Structure formats: structure tokens, C-alpha cells
Image (cartoon, helix red, strand yellow):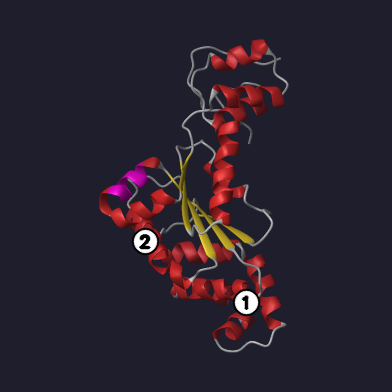
Amino acid sequence: MLGPSWRAAREKLLGMVHEDYQLMAIIGRAGTGKTTLLLSLEGIGDGIFMYADMTEVRDRDLSAIVSTVFADNIREVREIQEKLKRMSIKGLLRAFAKAGPDEVVESAKLKPMETLKLLNDAVELLGMAPLVIGIDEGLLSQDDPRSMDFINAIHAFRNNMQAIPSTKIIITLLPDVVNLISKIDTPLFDILRLGAITLPDYVTPEDLKEVAQEYGLGKTELSKIEALGPLTMRQLICLMNTKMDIIKCGIDTAGEISIE
């Protein structure tokens, strides 16, 4: 994604990852770029990044979240296990190294924090820290009956961060869920507020100009886009990639606009 607003958000997020923040939140409306910002951390250099997409997962409790982290990143988990096997280790880490993929995911379901701690300890022992986990749940609203399970799961992470010091957790959230957290779980809200990045609802004029320049649009095409009114980053990029297909991009307007 392009634009100074998005770059500033990414730089802030990277700064928090490299500092002592362990629990962070990317907050924004649908289409503002939460998932893209989260995925931009892949391949950042030091450490390991694991991405968990919760949008198609039925449950939202701690067990479902942690098991999804392991299931969605089983390849990376296997690589860590193989490195552990080459070391002279004993105890729980030895058992973790020998466990098969299904056993690891099942363990994450039954004992989520204990299994996450084993992964944290393995990464720490191997000198691969930090372990950065991105939990993508930007579609869950406060009206969803699963929202309380999700909030309780975040609270559980917050309560156990000292046990997983080499792990950093980044969660995407809709603003209304953050508002709900502020009402029912003030301690959690205070922690999230310290490590929060709020994305702008709509692209700024500077963002729009940079995107238009990148896609080679002239002043006429840029004026047509500006006439559409406020756009989310997702809508703007969609317009660029579909030659202004406003219907496909979910833009409500009475006029038909096209880019030749």
C-alpha cells in the first residue's frame, strides 16, 4: 500500500515491535488497511513472524486463537522443532520437538498458553527471538456474540505476557470492539491504548496523490476520483486495479466513471 499515512503507521508499528511492547493493536474500520499493515511485517528481519487469519474460524476463544496460530504456521513450527532436535534438550521442550503437527495443534487447543510458552521458549533458546504473532480479527464487531470470548482471550494474553517475554502479539480490531473493551475491561483497554495504532477512516489528499502518481493517472482521472467523496484505502486501490469499477469496489454513487 502507498501513501504517507500508511507509511507512518507502519513505521510506528515497527518501532513498537523493536521496543518493549508485547501487546499491540491495529485499529480501524473495514477497508482501512489493517490486514495489509499486519502482513507487511513478514520478512522484517530479526525474529519470526506468524500470521493467524481468524475470519473463517468458528470460535474466538483463547483455544481457537492459539490453535489457529499453530495450524496456520505449522511449516514454521516444524522448522523450529527440527532445530530443537539437533540440540541436547530435555523435558517439555524435548517432547515439543518430537510432537507431530496434529499433536502440536491439539496441544494448542487443550493447553493454549502452555503450548504458546513452549514455542516462546524454543524461539528464545534458538536465538530466533522475537516471535511476532499477528492475529487478524478485524471483522469481529461488538454485536457478534463471540466478541466476549475474543476480549477474554486478549485479556488472557495480557495476563500471561510475563511468561512469554520473547513473544509480541499484534491484534487487528474494529473501533466498536475497542469501545466495548473500554466499557467492560478498563485494565485491558489501558494496556491496548499504550500499543495502539489507529488507521485513518479515509485516505488523505496526500495519500490519494501518491497512489495516483504510482498508477500513472493524470489530473482529469484524479479529479474523477476526488469527486467520489471519501474513500477507504481498500476502495482506492480497488478503483486503480479495476479501472474505476465503482460497483465492484463497493462505492455508492449515482454516476458512472471510467478511466480509459
Residue visible at 55% across and 59% down?
A: 133
Q: Is residue 76 left or right of residue 91?
A: right
Badge 1 density bin: few <14, some 14–19, many ≥20, Cα 10 Å: some
Q: Quadrant of the C terminus?
A: top right
> Which residue was labeled with disc 2?
155
Outermost left residue: 183
Outermost front residue: 19
Find residue 28 and report its horizontal and vertical position in percent: 45, 39
Q: Is residue 85 left or right of residue 18?
A: right
Residue visible at 44% across and 57% down?
A: 58
- Does 122 sit above or below residue 28? below
- Does 43 sit above or below residue 203? below
- Does 191 sit above or below residue 197? below
Segment tinted magenta in the rendering = 176-182
Q: State which quadrant residue 174 falls in.
A: top left
Which residue is at the front of the view, 102 or 26?
A: 26
Q: State which quadrant residue 105 falls in.
A: bottom right
- Mark found first going from the N terminus, 2 or 1: 1
Residue visible at 68% across and 88% down?
A: 88
Q: Which mark is residue 125?
A: 1
Residue 178 falls within the magenta-colored stretch: yes
State whether the magenta stretch is mostly helix, strand or loop: helix
Find residue 117 and report its horizontal and vertical position in percent: 51, 73
- Does 87 sit above or below residue 63? below
Which residue is at the front of the view, 259 or 217?
A: 217
Residue 161 falls within the magenta-colored stretch: no
> Helix, strand or loop at disc 1?
helix
